[in-house]
Amino acid sequence: IFGITKMLSSERSYKDLVEEIQSKTFGNKWVAAYELSKQINSSQIPKEDYPWLVTHLSQSYNGSIDPRTRGFIVAALGALKTELALPILQVALGDSDLDVKFHAIVSVANMPKGIQFDWAKMIELLSSDKPILKQAAVLTLATHLVPEAQVPIKELLIDPSITVKYAAATVLINYKDEAAIPVLKEILLIPNPEASARILPPALDSQQIVDLKLGVLVTLQKNNWKVLNDILLDVANKDSNNSVATKAKEVLNLLKK
């Protein structure tokens, strides 16, 4: 513990950290990878060094047997937000470790819009038996508005996982797909637990319900989609959560213009 604490507190350049990740004797490579991702997130690395960094981190990913190290390497590459990292992120989508796959999906989501990417492997993850991977893939594909993902995302509207089902419905707003309307209505009309004795959907607490509703409202506003205006009026007048009711009223007024 002392050794790790010392490493986390010491000042090392990103090149030092890469050297530690690639070292054959350095024991806690995942700590160095974690520190590197922090430096990248704080914009401490000049963009002219991105090619060097991507090359060396890609080599480190391919040579690492520790999934924690691979995961933080992928997170670091994603934080760069450069298309140079896409080839190794494509490889990481097929990693044997769930967390590494998840980091790869999120890293692709953070890439600039309009990237040239082979989406086939990401679309395959919509059929994963891990709800967290399916949900992350749904959000990433919709963020980049991948046309060929619309139909497989639509199939998730009947997914047994309620979080996947609701994520699919919300992102289908980006495609203005009317198949999502029944589920979107279901989300917006979920009763708040403090105001109702009705049984709530499984695995959802009060804050998750509020976040779900706000997510739908913000996405409707962003896409200027008016198909749920009648429901928005109901939510604005009747939802017991003030944040949801206020946002519904704001979105409804904007969509009416």
Image: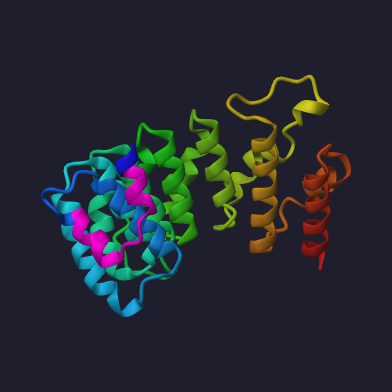
The answer to whether residue 122 of the structure is visible from this angle is no
Work out which quarter of the rendered image holds the C terminus and state it: bottom right
Residue 56 lies in what quarter of the image? bottom left
Q: x%, y% of residue 166?
A: 57, 39
Image height of 211 relative to 191, above or below: below
Q: Nearer the viewer, residue 183 or 11?
A: 11
Q: x%, y% of residue 217?
A: 70, 52
Q: x%, y% of residue 150?
A: 46, 52
Q: Which of 246 and 252 is in front in this view?
A: 246
Lateral position of residue 188 relative to residue 242, left or right: left
Q: x%, y% of residue 99?
A: 34, 40
Image height of 167 relative to 89, above or below: above
Lateral position of residue 138 relative to residue 101, left or right: right
Q: How many marks?
A: 0
Q: Residue at x 36, y 31 (%)?
A: 129
Lateral position of residue 132 relative to residue 91, left or right: right
Residue range highlighted in magenta: 4-21
In the rendered image, residue 18 lying in the magenta stretch gets the answer yes
Q: Residue at x 39, y 66 (%)?
A: 81
Q: Is the magenta stretch mostly helix, strand or loop?
A: helix
Q: Residue at x 74, y 36 (%)?
A: 189
Q: Which of 27 and 184 is in front in this view?
A: 27
